[in-house]
Image (cartoon, grey):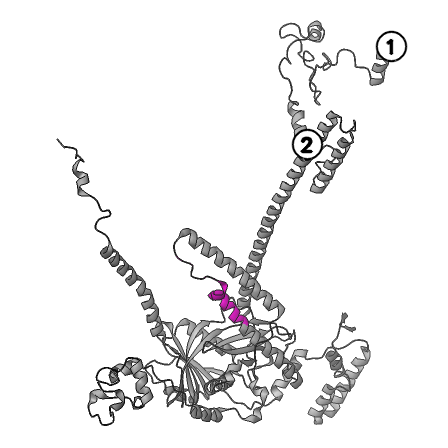
């Protein structure tokens, strides 16, 4: 077997043994050998010309001297100065705190959304998550890119406006300068509507979120209150036990303390429930007036000794006379319960003496 | 605080200056006399009248005939319009609605542009040179509409180049409601360029062309005297990204006006719409190729499914268990009558 160095390629007239010009050198041949391209025929195997052309990407053209020549040709004359061109080559402005905040907010929002989407997908078991983190999220990247452009424009404005002011070129138009705008008024109204809608929707969302958070908080406080009450009850029972055993020496102070404690608790809660004043339930009161306050209903219509003895005001007979004043002395205004004063309603009988008189009478009897 | 027509009004310093113009020594009175020297007597009488009026209302300020804004209009006519750039913006037939809208947007934002009816697709692009020359334009933005809504943008120096061809991507027009800014129609724009534009000669060339086409000449007749918006050109991902922002405050708070687009450069030619290619983009992939690549990527899914099925069928075992056939000797099948 011949060694590759011994082959004289330049003499080879056979077309099959075509070799690239730069493949002639020893190093190239060694490399080819190492790569396994040297076959027993000891030639670098080349693909045919057609295949090569197919594989080769169209060569990129970059004729720098010609470009520079044309650039010089088309450049604006220097006499025009900057005011004609108004161009500036600038980097992005330093990251303003409000923009950084916006970026952070957007990142947080997107990462939350991605999380929820991914968890949904996982639960459904449909597909693996397409986006894993915020860094390769196209939406967030779009936002960040736009922020970059915004900052570039910002830097340009910050650099150019002072320059323009020096030159005396107006940049602010006075309020009373009216001229046609790039966008019509009707279009701008539409824009304003959309903005308003967005604002209201965000406000709504904010409200809902706040409510939700409050609810969470309310639950926590409720749990706390219940625990405190249970603890107070336990303490109370324990101290009562101690009192019974005579450990506390007949001291009933703990009852007072307990009262104080409950009162404080009520204040903390902000409700009026723990206060001394009983709350009036007006609804209950009204119902009591209307229906009576419950209690015993049985036997209310039965005769009593008094009603039996009382022939004057009662009818006594069947259907004769008025039934008024007989039996129940129910009066408007809710003189509820107990026995009525028979005949009181009819206006007959004696009037009940006043409180002072009754007490005097009582004293005389005794 | 001064009284004007019975109302108390706060005057700015400039207005304080203006009030002096109205008096007998004011410039306006003097100008009148200068203008008509033959009517000297008449004007003198008028001047006296004005003086009396001024005396009468010594405490009050007579508002000038012209508004402040009229004054600021003045420099527009004073300056000389020297940089005569005119840009012809038009498109080919068969351009998509989006392309048409963006063309209109650009015409609206740049006062130094001219219109032309759409060009027939069968005409050679070289004919654009003649069309532009007939319209007195020395720059062109030509929107070439292709199938599937692709838009190619040609940017050219008439009559002898160079010209540049871009693929227009990610177009958002000014009409979209996400752009909340607004600016004067025909006000000049600041042009902000990315530092990358200085790095390579072809980018420098593009920058120069953008500057001459998108920059409205100073004192152009139809332009407004205020500078209230910025065009930004940035290079990202081998493309040129265009944005337009309104200047809200001097401290640099901006609002986007639109339109938005992204230009993927394809080639730069030596002449206008013809000539040798002096630069071509190695990263450029034609939209058709891109779409076919996407299709192929999607097609793989189906093929993969098929091959998986086939593989499963081939590798499926015939018996699920190795069973001893002698086990079944004593199993009795129910006899059917």
Question: Which numbered marker is on residue A95?
Answer: none
The residue tagged 1 is A364
Residues shaded magenta: A126-147
Q: Determine the chain carrying the residue at label 1.
A: A
* Inter-mark Cα distance, 2 to 1: 42 Å
> Mark 1, residues whose alpha carbon is within 10 Å: few (<14), some, or many (≥20)?
few
Residue B319 image position (x, y, % from top left): 22, 48
Tell me which chain the residue with mark 2 is part of: A
Q: Is residue A288 above or below residue A3?
A: above
Can residue A126 be seen in this snapshot? yes
Give the percent coordinates (x, y) of residue A223: 62, 41
Q: Quadrant of residue B333?
A: top left
Q: Nearer the viewer, residue A113 or B106?
A: A113
Question: Which is nearer the eye, B109 or B247?
Answer: B247
Q: Which mark is residue A281?
A: 2
**Residue A146 part of the magenta segment:** yes
Indicate whether residue B276 is drawn in magenta: no
Do the residues marked 2 and 1 share a common chain? yes
């Amino acid at each position: 077997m011949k060694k590759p160095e011994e082959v004289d390629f330049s003499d080879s007239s056979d077309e099959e043994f075509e070799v690239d010009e730069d493949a002639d050198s020893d190093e190239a041949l060694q490399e080819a050998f190492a790569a396994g391209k040297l076959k027993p025929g000891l030639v670098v195997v080349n693909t045919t010309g057609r295949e090569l052309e197919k594989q080769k990407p169209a060569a990129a053209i970059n004729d720098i001297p010609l470009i520079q020549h044309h650039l010089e040709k088309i450049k604006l004359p220097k006499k025009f100065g900057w005011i004609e061109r108004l161009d500036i080559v600038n980097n992005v402005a330093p990251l303003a705190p409000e923009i950084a905040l916006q970026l952070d907010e957007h990142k947080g929002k997107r990462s939350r959304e991605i999380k929820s989407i991914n968890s949904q997908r996982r639960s459904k078991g449909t597909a693996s998550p397409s986006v894993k983190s915020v860094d390769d999220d196209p939406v967030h990247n779009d936002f960040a890119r736009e922020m970059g452009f915004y900052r570039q424009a910002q830097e340009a404005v910050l650099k150019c406006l002072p320059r323009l002011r020096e030159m005396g070129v107006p940049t602010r138009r006075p309020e009373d300068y009216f001229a046609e705008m790039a966008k019509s008024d009707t279009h701008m109204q539409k824009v304003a509507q959309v903005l308003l809608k967005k604002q209201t929707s965000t406000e709504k969302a904010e409200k809902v979120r706040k409510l939700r958070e409050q609810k969470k908080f309310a639950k926590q406080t409720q749990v706390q209150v219940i625990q405190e009450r249970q603890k107070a009850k336990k303490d109370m029972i324990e101290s009562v036990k101690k009192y019974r055993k005579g450990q506390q020496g007949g001291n009933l102070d703990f009852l007072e303390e307990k009262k104080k404690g409950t009162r404080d608790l009520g204040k903390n809660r902000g409700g009026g429930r723990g206060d001394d004043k009983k709350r009036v339930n007006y609804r209950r009161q009204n119902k009591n007036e209307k229906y009576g306050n419950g209690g015993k209903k049985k036997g209310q219509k039965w005769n009593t000794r008094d009603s039996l003895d009382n022939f004057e005001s009662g009818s006594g007979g069947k259907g004769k006379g008025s039934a008024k004043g007989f039996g129940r002395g129910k009066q408007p205004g809710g003189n509820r319960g107990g026995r009525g004063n028979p005949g009181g309603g009819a206006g007959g009988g004696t009037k009940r003496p006043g409180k002072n008189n009754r007490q005097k009478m009582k004293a005389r009897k005794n | 605080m001064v009284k004007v027509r019975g109302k108390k009004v706060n005057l700015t310093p400039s207005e304080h200056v203006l009030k002096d113009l109205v008096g007998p020594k004011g410039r306006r009175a003097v100008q009148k006399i200068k203008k008509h020297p033959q009517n000297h007597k008449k004007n003198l009488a008028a001047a006296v009248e004005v003086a009396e009026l001024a005396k009468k209302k010594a405490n009050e300020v007579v508002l000038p005939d012209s508004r402040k804004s009229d004054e600021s209009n003045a420099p527009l006519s004073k300056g000389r319009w020297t940089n005569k750039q005119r840009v012809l913006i038009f498109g080919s037939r068969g351009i998509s609605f989006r392309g048409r809208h963006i063309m209109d947007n650009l015409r609206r934002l740049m006062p130094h542009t001219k219109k032309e009816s759409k060009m027939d697709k069968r005409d050679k692009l070289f004919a654009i040179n003649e069309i532009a020359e007939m319209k007195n334009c020395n720059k062109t933005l030509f929107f070439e509409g292709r199938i599937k809504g692709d838009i190619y943008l040609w940017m050219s120096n008439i009559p002898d180049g160079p010209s540049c061809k871009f693929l227009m991507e990610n177009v958002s027009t000014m009409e979209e409601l996400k752009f909340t800014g607004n600016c004067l129609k025909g006000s000049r724009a600041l042009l902000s360029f990315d530092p990358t534009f200085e790095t390579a000669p072809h980018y420098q060339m593009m920058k120069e062309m953008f500057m001459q086409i998108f920059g409205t000449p100073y004192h152009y007749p139809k332009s407004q005297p205020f500078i209230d918006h910025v065009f930004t050109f940035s290079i990202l991902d081998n493309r040129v990204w265009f944005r337009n922002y309104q200047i809200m405050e001097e401290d640099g708070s901006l609002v986007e006006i639109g339109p938005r687009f992204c230009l993927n450069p394809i080639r730069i030619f030596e002449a206008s719409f013809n000539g040798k290619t002096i630069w071509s983009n190695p990263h450029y992939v034609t939209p058709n190729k891109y779409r076919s690549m996407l299709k192929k990527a999607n097609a793989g899914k189906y093929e993969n499914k098929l091959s998986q099925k086939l593989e499963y069928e081939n590798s499926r075992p015939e018996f699920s268990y190795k069973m001893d056939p002698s086990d079944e000797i004593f199993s009795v099948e129910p006899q059917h009558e």
